[in-house]
């Protein structure tokens, strides 16, 4: 098994390897603002504030290992971005990529829009509505962490996917089980990658 990022120092070093100094500054700013905003609205669990890099930032950033380094030809769509994971972290690491964050809760939408402006992420757009109401477009990547059960996720996101779309779905410790419970045809379209931030967690990946 690969390295597991057990502490904040190793998680930060891992993310450093994926970006440049400006990217790290954006993530530091995101982390500080998020801890501040978490006093006003419940964005992340309080205990996870002290493990921001392992639990949230590196956990999101690791998805970049699963896609090509080149700018995708179509947008990266993140479903149910919430506090910003994983989509806002990807946008902070790859500001030249087109990223669309979908989030329905008004205060979270405000927060995401605020951070997109603060971090000057001109290629990142927030769709502040339910996914069901978003005008469909074809995405290169569809990511979602803790958004919906796999079957529902696939049906809600179908209008945004093509045969070439890569799904990246951090599913925690239920990944293998959730995939196993799917009909064989769907099972065959995905596999589970080991998460670098939790040795028992998996990421459901298409193709
Ligand atoms: C459990 S949170 C996860 C947030 C974030 N992805 C993370 O892992 O930290 C799920 C988020 O999805 C949003 N959500 C749920 N159903 C949605 C829908 N149909 N359209 C858009 N957003 C939705 C919720 O408002 C919530 O912020």
Image (spheres, helix red, strand yellow):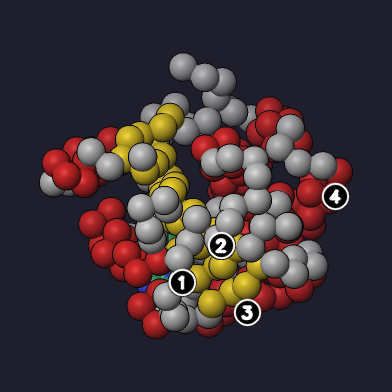
Position in image of residue 33 (x %, y %)? 74, 63
**Residue at coordinates 41% horizontally, 32% vertically from top-left?**
193
Q: Say which quarter of the image contains residue 8.
A: top right
Kindly state the secondary structure of the residue where label 1 is placed: loop
- Assign ligand 1 to one image quadrant: bottom left
Whether residue 84 can be seen here:
no
- The crowd level at tag 1 (other Cα within 10 Å; few <14, some 14-19, many 20+) is few
134 relative to 151, above or below: below
Kindly state the secondary structure of the residue where label 3 is placed: helix
- The crowd level at tag 3 (other Cα within 10 Å; few <14, some 14-19, many 20+) is some
The residue where tag 2 is placed is: 75
Q: CA distance from mark 4 to mark 3?
A: 24 Å
Position in image of residue 113 (x %, y %)? 66, 75
Label 4 CB, ligand 1: below 8 Å?
no
Q: Looking at the image, is mark 3 or mark 2 earlier in the sequence?
A: 2
Report if the CB atoms under discs 4 and 3 are less than 8 Å apart: no
């Amino acid at each position: 098994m690969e390295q597991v990022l057990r502490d904040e120092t190793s998680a930060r070093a891992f993310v450093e390897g994926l970006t440049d100094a400006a990217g790290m500054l954006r993530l530091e700013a995101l982390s500080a603002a998020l801890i501040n905003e978490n006093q006003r609205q419940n964005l992340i669990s309080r205990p996870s504030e002290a493990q921001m890099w392992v639990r949230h930032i590196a956990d999101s950033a690791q998805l970049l290992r699963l896609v090509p380094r080149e700018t995708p030809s179509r947008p990266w769509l993140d479903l149910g971005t919430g506090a910003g994971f994983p989509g806002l972290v990807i946008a902070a690491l790859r500001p030249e990529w087109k990223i669309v964050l979908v989030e329905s809760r008004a205060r979270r939408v405000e927060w995401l829009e605020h951070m997109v402006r603060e971090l000057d992420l001109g290629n990142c757009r927030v769709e502040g509505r339910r996914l069901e109401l978003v005008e469909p477009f074809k995405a290169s990547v569809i990511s979602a962490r803790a958004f919906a059960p796999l079957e529902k996720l696939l049906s809600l996101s179908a209008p945004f996917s093509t045969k070439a779309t890569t799904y990246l779905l951090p599913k925690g410790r239920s990944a293998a089980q959730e995939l196993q419970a799917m009909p064989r045809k769907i099972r065959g379209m995905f596999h589970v990658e080991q998460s670098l931030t939790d040795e028992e967690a998996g990421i459901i990946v298409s193709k």
